[in-house]
Image (spheres, grey):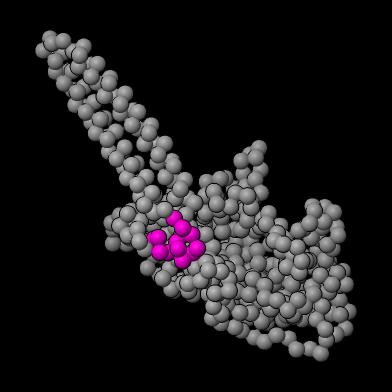
Amino acid sequence: MIDIAALRADPASFEDAWNKRGLSVDVTALLALDEEVRHLKAESESLRNQVNVASREIGEVARSGGDVAAAKQRVREIGDRAKELARSCTEQEEVLTNQLLELPNPCLATVPAGADASANAVVATWGEPPRLDIVYKPHWDLATDLGILDLERGAKLSGSGFVVLRGDGPRLVRALLTFFLDHLTRQHGYTEVMVPHLVQPSVMRGTGQLPKFQAELYHCERDDLYLIPTAEVPVTNLHAGEILSEADLPRRYCAYTPCFRREAGAAGVGTRGMTRVHQFDKVEMVWLAHPDRTEQDLAALRGHAEEMLQALGLHYRVLDLCTGDTGFSAAHTYDLEVWSPGTGQWLEVSSCSTFTDFQARRAGIRYRPAGGGKPRLIHTLNGSGLAIPRCFISLLETYQQADGRVIIPEVLRPYMGGQESIGG
């Protein structure tokens, strides 16, 4: 959530930032509502003070034997008015909060301006597409031929957008997950956590999924719990409402969870096989960081994701997302996309983002400066490290051979009992 005090101080910069996101916000009306709330709050507090003063005066009149009936009536009238104003203040404050919850995070000044994905900038590439003298099969054909993917039974069990893996399919998934977690914990000191896959609405609000993306979430109404769309949600909220020590920053967590999302996009190549599904596995990286190091920490976070793609030998590129394509809560995002030789497409496997203090303000996560003083909001960052389905797709298609086998990258072989290939 944005800082309303910062909006009051510099409304033009917020309006400009939202315009660059393609959003028109009536900042004047928003500030007028804020002014009304502050006025109601000040007036109700003033009346409560008057009640306190008048009540003390009643005591003095009573002790002197005077008539207190009129004074008591005045106190009741002032008190009733104070309660009325307090109710109005609460109602208007709720309206203001709801409006603020719907507003996206302004992008950092370093983010390239642009209306949509066509303005995203390619800032790095690694590796080369495979060049075997074969026609590369798309993963849905390749994996089906290998007997490791069953699309029909996935649809039979749960409908479109769900898959069944078997044999070396789930074995490869487990190898990827374990490799990712081992790399992050052993090479970069992340703390691995295992978190619930169902969370309360307040946890969804903390990271910006609610109220904006209500329609895309799976909601268990009886318990008022939501299936998580990403581990970012519970992991970021681990320290909701807490004050951390500056010496403990950054806190770096990683977690494996399944992820659940209603959106499945339009029909066609982009949704065939495992490209876009309602349930998928992912390792997430989450940082609770010092606000003075946002861009440096984002570069480090992105670097950790790139290291794992390089270890797998997958050709990828890095996009610096423009203002019009940056996610609701993010202030700056880099997307990592792997090459899919079977479809001739780039597939996103990680979005590495800084959210500045946007999520921390919602979740109430602060730190106390080492030199003392008032607690400050931390900055949150996260990125997929990495998402399984599209890594699985790129790996199968990249390492397929003319005889139908798929070579297993060397870094994964220890996690698969030394197995060197699938099929054949």
Residue stretch rendered in magenta on the structure: 14-25
- The residue lying at 14 percent from left, 15 percent from top is 61
Q: What residue do we see at 88% from left, 79% from top?
A: 424
Q: Quadrant of the N terminus?
A: bottom left
| In the image: residue 12, left or right of residue 95 | left
**Location of residue 33 (image quadrant):** top left
Q: Does residue 77 appear to the left or right of 313 in the view shown?
A: left
Horizontal relation, residue 148 to residue 323: left or right: right
Image: 295 above or below 355: below
Please report the residue visible at 46 percent of the width from the left and 58 percent of the height from the top.
24
Is 20 magenta? The answer is yes
- Outermost left residue: 64
x, y percent for residue 158: 79, 52
- Using the rendered image of the protein, determine whether residue 268 is visible from the camera's viewpoint: yes
- Above or below, 46 relative to 361: above
**Residue at (74%, 65%) from the top-left corner?**
271
Name the residue nearer the viewer: 256 or 49: 49
Q: Is residue 211 above or below residue 168?
A: above
Inspect the magenta stretch and tell me whether residue 86 lies in it: no
Q: Quadrant of residue 416?
A: bottom right
Q: Picture coordinates of residue 20 (x, y %)?
A: 46, 66
Q: Is residue 249 visible?
A: no
Q: Position of residue 52 (x, y in %)?
A: 22, 26
Image mark count: 0
Above or below residue 66? Residue 356 is: below
**Front residue (pair 204, 89):** 89
Place residue 165 in its image quadrant.
Answer: bottom right
Residue 346: x and y in percent read 67, 76
Compare residues 104 and 206 and report the one nearer the observer: 104
